[in-house]
Amino acid sequence: MVLMEKTAYIIDGYIDEPACLGVPPYISPYIRTIAGLLAVEGYETGYLTIDQIRKDPGLLGKPAESDLVVMIAGVTVPGTYLGGTPATITEIQQIGSLLTEPVTCIGGPVQFGYSHGGGTPARKMALSGFGTILTGNPATALYHLLAGDDPAGELNYRLLDPWSVSGAGIIRKHPSYPRVMCELETARGCSHAITGGCSFCTEPLYGKPVYRAISAIAEEVSALYREGAQHFRLGRQPDLLVYQSLGKEFPEPIPEKIEELFSAIRYAAPNLHTLHIDNINPGTIARHPDAARAALEAIIHGHTAGDVAAFGMESADPVVIHANNLKATSNQVMDAIRIVNEVGGNRRDGIPELLPGLNFIAGLAGETADTYRINREFLESLLASDLFVRRVNIRQVMPFFGTPAYNTNTLSRYDRNFRSFKEWVRTHFDRPMLQKVFPLGTVLCDVWIEKEETRTDPAFGRQMGSYPILIGIPAVIPPAISGDVVVTGYGMRSLTGFFIPIPINGLPARALLHLPAIGKKRLSTILSKRPFHSLADLEDVIGKTEINPHYIFTSPEAPSPS
């Protein structure tokens, strides 16, 4: 007699929290630890994403026939996504109603509520169809459920760490594999929670910081690396600089711990392609500049270039900062930007090692129309300096029950000012900053045409990394193509570029216009003189340009990207 193995399915509805991202190409730690638990419990586990189900609803047939289904979903930070779209509450409820036979569970940040986007308070919604809500950590909650206990998930790294190893193989089932960014958890909770945390943030709901051991993180990386993982981000923590620091609201960084962490990851995955970070508290840098500088130097010694330190600035208005218990004043944020530029501004392979990214939030308590003037003046002073930031995110607060912002906010009062400020940033700040960070002729290595359905002109691609810049390529390019791209122009929040070598003899006229200094007159000359057989012939027509002429392919036959 053949014994039938228990079967389970994980449905990834994608998550986005202040300290965790799980939207493709990212895969969250929640998915991997649940997969690890199920492996230990003897389940044969399948995996589906919400995007796969949208394309083919019939795929739900397999989960419907399994013994157990676990869905992970929820967004507590509104965002704009290229690689995938998080599950809506309607989709979550529909999936739950269709899965009638197996034991069904749902967990993740959806437990805190659901909002249709920034500017709308999150509401507790009925998750109809699901038999169990996994509260707290979904993997440990499921562990208790399978043991016959209440599905309440405490943070227990003694359980979670082994599951992060045994669940590593689930990444092979991700539709983006092998270009999957593995979000690594180093800690849960926030030291700023000692005084309540920032008014809008859900991370203090997890309590004070609890840190994972370096050895456990290294074992997880090693397991993922054996399964083909090449891209990693230390993203599951509110402030990487204070890893292993305890006892204060703004603890001092321990640079030796940062160096040890990165060294252990590098040893576990010696030929990794990407190792980036996410959240850095500017208040930590401003209050402990020497220790922070040393910790940043340790990051740069161990990471890969093109990294971004996400600063939760939120507002430059001192009234708003005080009313919402924010982490740093505008002067402190500027000091932190300067220090990160001094340490991380050097270029490797043409791009800066590490730059700050700024987050602004509208609709917080204390906000007035004057708040947006103050924010604008801060960015104007930044633009006038010799300092760089990689990007500026602007969003409206999404208040969740249990956070102070749920009851005290200024949502919808200054919508016109918010829209005007956002338009000013996109029109007058982003483009000149991009020109400073990515000068014409910069080469971005290993750019991937990310969306499967991309067959448009232009095509859009990105590098793997933390907040990678979007690049429009003026050509119809098949999906899953990758190659090195040279920057030839700028959008409001994106770059224009070409795969290199640029097939100058095969480009259509509209694409040629995206090369620097190519106007209609020079375009006509290029079209009449093609095909070019040497760089000298080409330079006679286009003259000197910011684009290295060796990036331009002059054979009559145009090559394709790799």
Image: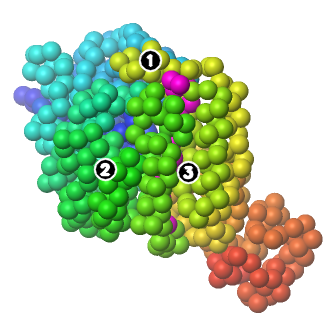
Q: Which range is magenta?
A: 352-366
Which residue position is annotated with label 2? 240
* Image quadrant containing the N terminus: top left
Could you tell me the amino acid type at mark 1?
Answer: Tyr
Residue 95: percent from left, percent from top: 41, 18
348 over 496 or under it: above or below: below
Q: Check the image and report above or below for 518 versus 383.
A: below
Taking 522 as reference, is 290 left or right? left
Residue 406: give its label. Answer: 1
Question: Residue 523's x, y, as percent?
Answer: 87, 70
Q: Secondary structure at mark 3?
A: strand
Q: Quadrant of residue 40?
A: top left
Closer to the camera in the image, 168 or 1: 168
| Mark before the other along the chain sequence, 3 or 2 | 2
Callout 2, which amino acid? Leu
> Decide: marks 1, 3 in contact (CB < 8 A)?
no
State left or right for residue 135 relative to residue 97: left
Magenta highlight on residue 82: no
Q: Earlier in the sequence, mark 2 or mark 1?
A: 2
Main secondary structure of the magenta stretch: strand
Callout 1: helix, strand or loop? helix
Q: Nearer the viewer, residue 67 or 130?
A: 130
Q: How many marks can you see?
A: 3
Q: Residue at x 52, y 31 (%)?
A: 319
Question: Does the image show residue 311?
Answer: yes
Res 137 → quadrant: top left
Q: Please report whichever mark, 1 or 3, sits nearer to the chain's N-terminal start.
A: 3
Q: Which corner quadrant of the image does residue 7 belong to?
A: top left
Please, which residue is most extreme toward the left here?
1
